Image: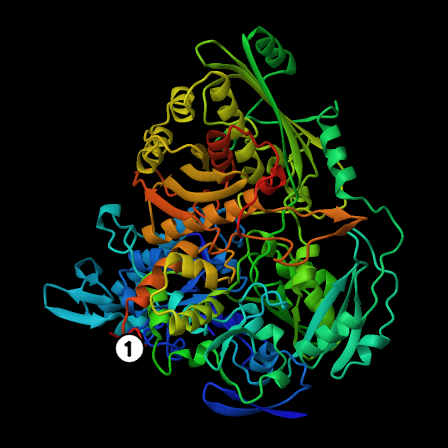
Amino acid sequence: MAADRTTDGITVLNRRGFLAIGAGLAVGATIGAPAAGAVAPTDAAAINAYVSIAENGDVTIVTPGAEMGQGVADAMPRIVAEELDADWSRVTVRLSGASPAFVAKNKRQRSANSDGITSYYEILRKVGASTRALLIAAAAQRWKVDASTVQTREGRVLHPASGRALGYGDVAALAAKLPVPANVTLKDTKDFRLIGRNFPRKDIPAKVRGTAEFGMDLVLPGMLFATVRHAPVAGGTLEPVDPAPALAVVGVRKVVPLEANAVGVIADRLWQAQKGAAALTVTAKPGPRIGSAELHQRIRAGLDSADILPFPVEFEGPQPVMSSSAEAVDSALAAAPVKVEALYEVPYLAHAAMEPLCCTALVTADRCEVWGSMQCADVVAPELAKIIGIPAESITVNRTFMGGGFGRKNERDFVQQAVRLAMAVPGRPVMLVWPRDEDMRNDFYRPAFAARLTAGVKVDGSIAAMRGKISGQPLSTMSQFRIPGFADGAVAGGLVSPDYQLGERRIEGVEIEGPMRTGYWRSVAGSQNGFFSESIIDEIATKLKRDPLEYRLAIAKDDPRTHAVLKLAAQKAGWDKPLPKGQGRGIALATGWGSRCAMVVEVAAAGNTLTVRRIVAAFDCGMQISPDNIVSQIEGAAIFGLSAALFGKITLEDGAVVQGSFGDYPVVSMRSAPAVEVHLIASDAPVGGVGEAGVPGVAPALCGAIFAATGKRIRTLPIIDSGFEVAI
Amino acid sequence: MSITLSINGKDRSVDVPADTPLLWAIRDEIGLKGTKFGCGVGICGACTVHVDGTAVRSCSVGVGDVGEGKVTTIEGLGEGTDHKVQAAWIAEQVPQCGYCQPGMIMAVAAMLATTPKPTDADIDEQITNICRCGTYPRIRRAIHRAAATSSSTGAS
């Protein structure tokens, strides 16, 4: 086993050091192999943790990100391959488990916050360049020439002076033994031939052939299956469960209490476990049982609470720009000739990824290995170590393809449950699969919020002051990242738009207690504050009898990228072309993650039947790695946002979450999916985030379109609660 | 009890109760993992397979009800090469997470067998599978692309 090595600040561990307890149990989904179904060559030389090169020249590159659909299994290795000067057609991708070798510049390894590319871009380039330098050094040694005379081209080392050439595979074994260079030169970006161009995503063939390995597709020798039931009350705990009805089901082996709120059933087969779990009677211990009406009243009442926490109105780099004082905002509001105020509300939302939560665990006397559909990585083993009572170093964390994540699979509740179940059957792997209804009823929900925005506007349309106050549950997930004295950024961030020239600005948050577990949901604060902050701009434009596009351009900050996306989206949507009666367009701006997005939504209303006809987006994420995948992400984000805006709502009845599947938590389908056009703007801005940026603009643009079509201003989501019908 | 199923042209014997959903027989007895579990109640379509060429949500059919029906899963759709629907999916770069796509592809392949040139309205009517990544615009394009392909495989 090669020793750990360090290259340019990146700890590079020989990946073989991480392979598994239980011979043959290590898995690493491999995709994009030159031949379908091929696995990483066994003769490959591991140059570092990321790159292995086989004698035949096949290159395997590990993606440090977790692939949940966003394309990091393609884009991240592509960045390495660019600097490596690899032949992309010979590159196979492997998914990563948790490893210090794969932490990003923020010292974390998890796929969230749309920062996959932004937080790994330089690291991946250096890995590629460093690997290339080693191959050059190996070739130079072999040819007994100076390394400066050796060049590379698409997987080959060349010595032009003598006309000699070798494949990377010919020198990889030697390269793996050479000292890692302290400094490497990166390519000039104008010489990029992989970054910024379209290639077919390497994970797609396996995904259309049914061979991509998701968490649930893992096969391990001796594996048992398990499922789970939770207390049927949000935030509740379980009365002791009589295991007998489950144990009476053929194949059921054990009924295992899991912390205070759940019980697991282990069986020989998953179907048997599901049958057994369904046979159990699960009852919540007595406790508060709140319904949605009371909960939303509590949230609304928060808007009148004086118990506020301020939040910065924006950040300049890491530096917070603080709110104006309450007095300054109040006096500017009082002095303004036009006042616009609105109350908005949004509900709790579930993630409802296509693949229900799933994780497999194996616990032996002194080790543990988990395999799961996980966005997270670095935090998993330390948490499991406390549960099992073994060192974190004795725990191996593997990750598979995820069938969607949207923030939910950054949580570890299901991983910890899998380990607790595996502890009940030491030496046997246990695959835990949550049923759909458990997944939907035991989420870390996007919280429900009420927000009041107040704007003081001058006669010329400039906004002298804006105050935003938001009330709702903070995110459970955020508790460890909170800045003392401030509102939760995932609640309050961006409530007053940072994109417009505003005078006095103030953001205030009020925290209410609620029974729901709350967490990251694709675009996080943008998911509610995009709706609030852009809706109030629309309402001001209406009050001033100004066109929503013209008004936005008039008050937007002097940021050329912002102006460009607004203009392009409007132009492509035909903003200036009148629509027939009953149809309308709305526009919204969403910025964040270093990107700019503008969206125009076009609707038709016939009576109360609403059809979303078209969504046109203009998007600028700075440097583009994979343009077609960026388009794909914005298309998908638009539809994800549309599902929530039209239909999304989780409610409580007598303490229990009502919705249990796609029947009562409907999402956009083929019929209700509009045409989505995405127009990219290539800018020379630094690389920005993509995955979430297409979500926040949908609801405000849609509600603007409904207003234009019908004159009805929707301030409460989902839209179907305002008397509209949408064919699903 | 032992039940014989015809899966992808081969007779396969499974020793499960007759009410075991076809999905779990396919996945955990026969070991074909391309057919996915999404909701378990026949709404999402991730588990779609063909029984005698018709799209069926395998989570909601007991193995005992399949009888002599010939079951085709995503693994058997292309008969050794990509089916034209799979080829169209690659050409249009449809999948994101990919979890719903085997079921989606099976539903589309069954539709094209009876509606070879579907209109957008046909697609809206017949393709009711759910995709949470929101790949519907590309799915629509890929369906039209597949429909324009004359042979059954995407090789042409």
Left or right relative to A302: residue A163: left
Reply above or below: A342 against A445: above
B25 or A619, which lies in front? Answer: B25
Q: Residue at x 47, y 9 (%)?
A: A459
A218 vs B65: above or below: above
Q: Amino acid at mark 1?
A: Asn
Image coordinates of residue A398 in percent, x first then y, are 55, 67
Q: Where A121 falls versus A152 (above or below)? A: above
Name the residue nearer the viewer: A66 or B124: B124
Q: Indicate the quadrant where residue A664 lies.
A: bottom right
What is the quadrant of residue A397 in the picture?
bottom right
Q: Residue at x 52, y 69 (%)?
A: A214
Q: Is residue A464 above or below residue B155?
A: above
- Write the residue at 87% across / 71% down: A242
Q: Chain of mark 1?
A: A
Q: Going by the image, does A447 lie left or right of B82?
A: right
Element at label 1: loop
Q: Nearer the viewer, residue A430 or A583?
A: A583
Q: Position of residue A317 (x, y in %)?
A: 47, 32
Percent x, y for residue B10? Answer: 48, 91
Query: In this view of the protein, can residue A183 be seen by the observer?
Result: yes
Q: Which residue was labeled with disc 1?
A: A56
